[in-house]
Amino acid sequence: MARVESISTQDRNPYSVFGSISKGVVTGAVLGYVAKNALPLQNSEKNEAYYQGLARVKEDAKLTKGIVIDEIRNLDSRTPAQDVFIKAVDAEKAAGTDTNAAKRAFSMHKLIKEAGLDENGMKELRNIIAQVNEKAKTSTKYYVKGYNSAVKNMKRPTIAFLTMGAVAGFFGGLIHNVLTSNKEV
């Protein structure tokens, strides 16, 4: 007796289309939500209030630098490099309104030269300055990133990104079904 086999092993179930489209819609919605937070802020989202808030955030981040400086200032016994660093910070604060950067740099150089630090002392002073600046830079990046995230959450409606992603996923699933149905014929 001859054996009968079906021509196609796939079922022609009308509900099989629904599965790939629904997967596309869900995947698109998830990607839309991710895009809401992943996309950088556009110029149209940055208004005057944004820049004022950003300036306040940067000012608050500068407090980290002051905390580290105060920790060095409050040490019971300081190294000569730490003393020079504190003197330089105090001189910088005193000349805070002086906008002549060359004049301030010259006075700092003169202060450091008068301290008479040896090679190890200069290396320690450079390390102190680098560490303080790195902590300030890191905290500033952290605060600015948080502020930008908050602005994205306030200015970008979640439903719009979910809807755009779901619509794109729907069409992606539909195109997938069309392409796979053409292969079967």
Image (tube, grey):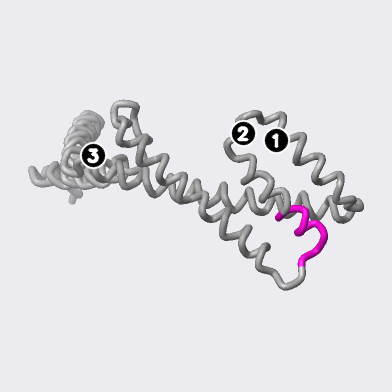
Q: Where is residue 127 in the image (x, y as percent from the top left)?
A: 75, 53
In contact (CB < 8 Å): disc 1 and disc 2? yes
- The residue that label 1 is drawn on is 104
Task: Determine the residue located farthest toward the bottom in the rendered image.
Answer: 76
Task: Determine the residue located farthest toward the top in the rendered image.
Answer: 44
- 103 sits left or right of 16 in the view: right
Q: Distance between the residues labelled 3 and 2?
A: 42 Å
Q: Earlier in the sequence, mark 1 or mark 3?
A: 1
Q: What residue type is labelled 1?
A: Arg
In the image shown, does 77 or 65 lie closer to the viewer? 77
Q: Which residue is drawn at 69% across and 69% down?
A: 75
- The residue that label 2 is drawn on is 98
- The residue that label 3 is drawn on is 156
Q: How crowded is mark 3: few (under 14 residues within 10 Å), some or many (20 or more)?
A: some
Q: Distance between the residues labelled 1 and 2?
A: 8 Å
Q: Which amino acid does label 2 sit on?
A: Asp
Q: Which amino acid does label 3 sit on?
A: Arg
Q: Which residue is drawn at 35% across and 46% down?
A: 149
Which quadrant is the C terminus positioned in?
Answer: top left
Q: Position of residue 130 (x, y in %)?
A: 70, 49
Q: Earlier in the sequence, mark 3 or mark 2?
A: 2
Q: How many marks?
A: 3
Instruction: Give the number of the mark in front: 3 or 2.
Output: 2
Q: Write the start and end of the magenta stretch as one range.
A: 78-86
Q: How far apart are marks 1 and 3 (CA)?
A: 44 Å
Check residue 130 in the rendering and tell me which mark sits there, or answer none: none
Residue 181 visible in rendering: no
SS at badge 3: loop
Instruction: Give the number of the mark in front: 1 or 3.
Output: 1
